[in-house]
Amino acid sequence: MKGIVALTAIVVTSVWAWIIGVRMRRRIRRALGHDARNEVELTSLNTWMKVEDEEERRSGGKLH
């Protein structure tokens, strides 16, 4: 029983992580006009600052 619960948790976590990765890549593509080139770019603070700046610029400064 514990094995089934552990396996289910691993599968759910893996699928959720994949979905989050797809969303992050899509957000970068929309804001910066190019795909995230690698995993490092997905976790780069510099990249996310650029994304935030571009999204704010496009919204006319009304993000927050």
Image (cartoon, rainbow, N blue to C red):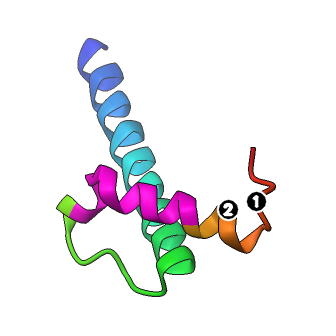
The correct choice, above or below, for 33 with respect to 45 in the image is: below
Q: Which residue is mark 2?
A: 56
Callout 2 environment at 10 Å: few (<14), some (14 to 19), or many (20+)?
Answer: some
What's the mark number on residue 25?
A: none
Q: Position of residue 42 (x, y in %)?
A: 31, 59
Residue at 33% of width from left, 45% of height from top?
14
Residue at 27% of width from left, 12% of height from top?
2
The correct choice, above or below, for 61 with respect to 16 in the image is: below
Q: Residue furthest bottom?
A: 33
Q: Is residue 50 left or right of residue 7?
A: right
First in sequence, mark 2 or 1: give its number. 2
Callout 1 environment at 10 Å: few (<14), some (14 to 19), or many (20+)?
Answer: few
Cβ atoms at labels 2 and 1 below 8 Å apart: yes
Q: Position of residue 24 (x, y in %)?
A: 46, 61
Residue at 67% of width from left, 62% of height from top?
56
Residue type at mark 2: give it: Glu
**Element carrying mark 1:** loop
Q: Position of residue 35 (x, y in %)?
A: 37, 82
Q: Nearer the viewer, residue 50 or 14?
A: 50
The alpha-carbon separation of the residues under discs 2 and 1 comes to 5 Å
Give the residues drawn in magenta, as a range. 41-53
Q: Is residue 63 left or right of residue 33?
A: right
Q: Is residue 59 left or right of residue 30?
A: right
Residue at 32% of width from left, 50% of height from top?
45
Q: Which residue is mark 1?
A: 61
Labels in figure, total: 2
Q: Position of residue 46 (x, y in %)?
A: 31, 57
Residue type at mark 1: give it: Gly
**Element carrying mark 2:** helix
